Image: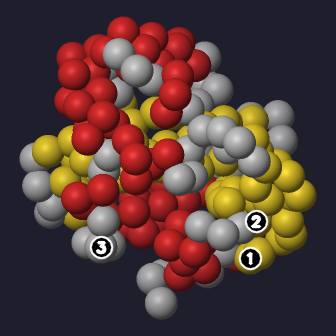
Amino acid sequence: MFVHKIDEELSLKLQELRDAERIFALTDASRDYLREWLPWLDFTTELQDTKDFIKSGSRNFVEGKSLGAVIIYKGEIVGIGGFNNINHANKTAYIGYWLGQEYQGNGIMTRVAKALTDYALTELKLNKVEIRVAAENHKSRSIPERLGYTQEGTIRQAEWLYDHYVDHVVYGMLSDAHNGTSTK
């Protein structure tokens, strides 16, 4: 079981089936808000979809391929954060995250991304962590920028988002540039 305490009010815990109802309810309550930047909302329309996602994530965690964690803020699940992909051969990990709409503006995701970066580079001994963000998603882009990630480039039309393509900006943090990534 993966549990990682970030600070007094925030921690990460491996997703479990018993979290499915809360995750689905949070997804449903934030559906319109999340839909602006996340492509999977139309495929998560009932509780079973969330359960299937958790089961898949659990298999991938056991195989060392990813880490899907719930974000717990003041004792309540408020979002998801983790590594969408861990590539041990190349020593890289790709951070992904989302937060329920009502929890925005508390610095939660910056602290989560910092903790995941630190964990990947110090505990997992990886060489690089990436965060890929839709080019127009300025709130999400501010997170890797605040943490000292390097903007490495743009992938044109990287993702189909319901009815249009979006470009992704790629941010990277290398282990030799990592000093615990301080928040600016």
Marks 1, 2: nearer the viewer:
2
Residue in the image at 87% along x and 58% along y: 155
Decide which of 136, 32 is in the foreground and name it: 32
**Percent position (x, y) of residue 29?**
26, 41
Label 3: how many Cα within 10 Å (few below 14, some 14–19, many 20+): few
Which quarter of the picture shows residue 170?
bottom right
Note whether 68 is above or below 147 in the view shown. Answer: above
**Percent position (x, y) of residue 182?**
48, 81
Q: Which of disc 1 and disc 3 is earlier in sequence? A: 3
Relative to 112, 41 lies left or right: right
Note whether 32 is above or below 107 in the view shown. Answer: above
Q: Which of disc 2 and disc 1 is earlier in sequence? A: 1
Three-letter code, disc 1: Thr
Task: Give the tally of numbered discs.
Answer: 3
In contact (CB < 8 Å): disc 1 and disc 2: no
Q: Which mark is residue 169?
A: 2
Q: SS of the residue at dot 1?
A: strand
Which quarter of the picture shows residue 127?
bottom right
Note whether 132 is above or below 16 in the view shown. Answer: below
